[in-house]
Image: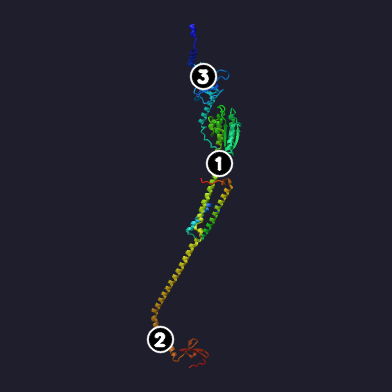
Amino acid sequence: MSEEQFTFEDKLQQLESIVSQLEKGDRPLETALADFQTGVGLVKDLQKTLKDAEDTLAKVIDNDNELSDLELTND
Amino acid sequence: MEKEQNKYLTVSALTAYLKRKFDADPYLAKVYVTGEISNMGRRRGPHLYFSIKDSESNAVISASMFGYERRIKFQPEEGMKINAVGRVEIYEPRGSYSIILESMTPDGVGELFLAYEQLKRKLQAEGLFDLLKKQLPIFPKKIAVITSPTGAVIEDIARTVQRRFPSAQVILFPAVVQGEKAAPTIIRQLQRIDNMDFDTVIVGRGGGSIEDLWAFNDENLARTIASMQTPVISSVGHETDNTLVDFVSDRRAATPTAAAELATPITLQQLTTRLQELHLRQIARIKQMIDMRQQRLNRVATHVIFQQPDRLYTGYNQRIDQLSHSLQQLTKQRVINEKYKVVAILQRQQHLQRSLLQPIQERLQLLSTKLDLVSPLKILSSGYAIVEYDKKVVRSTTDITINDEIDMRFSDGHATAKITGVQHE
């Protein structure tokens, strides 16, 4: 399974489970370190995804002059 | 003369007589009369006074209708052909006769109306009016209008649709809307439209008399509309006019403008507003989604494991320290223990030595003293020497020859000598 097939949620869940595994501390050090590296990679990856999403959203709103003038209302 | 005089009647007596004759005559009690309305307009409150005259001649009869509003459903007009039922009466004060009307229908309408009612009952019994009404499309692209190409209907519809939902096309299917040819042309246009791609069709006509609107009570037209795939809006005549088309159509409108409003349920303005609202809502939702995930990620990303990754192995370090400490301790202990063991064994050994060897030593001591007494060394100290050759004691002259090196042991040391001569004795 290639990494691209995992959704943001999948990755976030994977990250959370890595962290809770690491918290338990009942894994061999080699595995723990490998997991940690994976975890750091996931954090970077997910932060990038979120930033891209925010940028895209900002761009969409900016391109829509008609709507960017409007106040956001909570309904 | 008196008799002659008696022959003469007063006008009132004659009139009273005539009135009695009229009232007693069964034929005059219910008279069916047909003619044209003339001298209209002398209305006095709830009652109607006019004349009915023959179309072909000038013959005329006065007519009255008391409380006309509850008797007739139409507005009588000058020149209108009518069929009336009433009784003929003499009005004594004036000596005039007139027909007091019970009922009156426009000529021809009676028959038409009857036909309409019969047809309506027939179609109703078939369930044609109870068919499931089709939904009108919310965003029509093409609206067909079957009506007269001239007149206000198409104009009103086009203007209203343009105002409310400009993207919808209004396409006119011209039709005759009155007379013999009306129903067949309308049917043909309906069939054409149903084979094309229209969202809605409006069948329209302005107001008029029942004869004007008669085409819209056509049985085939009603059946065609009932079997249409395309939703049909009828806008025939005014609100008070009922035609069979109204009953079989999916929606009915009082005016062409109202029909156009039904055909465009949502205006462009409403749609734009709604779209903007949805757009803003989706932006808000996406923002919220991003924020929620950001928070969730932050919770994980700021976890102490990522902040201080050395925690991953500090545990191991501690364990290693502890273990090496324990190892040292244990080893030390072990060495100490072994030392004790060795010391104990040595002590035992010494003890054993003492207990075992002492008697032997004492004996040995004794023996060595004794031995010493008999030691050849003792003899040596008296001046004897032991001669050895080749590590053996020389006991005879045969054991040595000239040039042999001999070793002589004295009580206090050795000396070596060379044999220079041997004599046997």
Mark before the other along the chain sequence, 2 or 3: 3
Q: Going by the image, does B175 lie left or right of B370?
A: right
- Residues indicated by labels 2 and 3 sit on the same polypeptide chain: yes
Among the two numbered marks 3 and 1 on one chain, the one whose residue lies closer to the N terminus: 3
Label 1 Cα neighbours within 10 Å, binned few <14 / some 14-19 / many ≥20: few
Q: Amino acid at mark 2?
A: Thr
The x and y percentages for residue B70 are 49, 25
Q: Quadrant of residue B175?
A: top right
Circles 3 and 1, Cβ within 8 Å, touching? The answer is no
Q: Does residue A2 appear anywhere in the picture?
A: no
Name the foreground residue: A54 vs A24: A54
The residue lying toward the viewer, choosing from B50 and B253, is B50
Disc 3 is placed on an element classified as: strand
Give the residue number, with chain letter if any, for mark 2: B369
Q: What kind of element bears circle 2?
A: helix
Subunit of label 3: B
Q: Chain of mark 2?
A: B
Residue farthest toward the top in the current orientation of the protein? B1
Q: Which mark identifies residue B271?
A: 1
Residue B55 at x, y percent in the picture: 57, 20
Which residue is identified by label 3? B99
State whether discs 3 and 1 lie on one chain.
yes
Residue at horizontal 40%, vertical 85%? B367
Q: Is residue B367 above or below residue B181?
A: below
Q: Nearer the viewer, mark 2 or mark 1?
A: 1
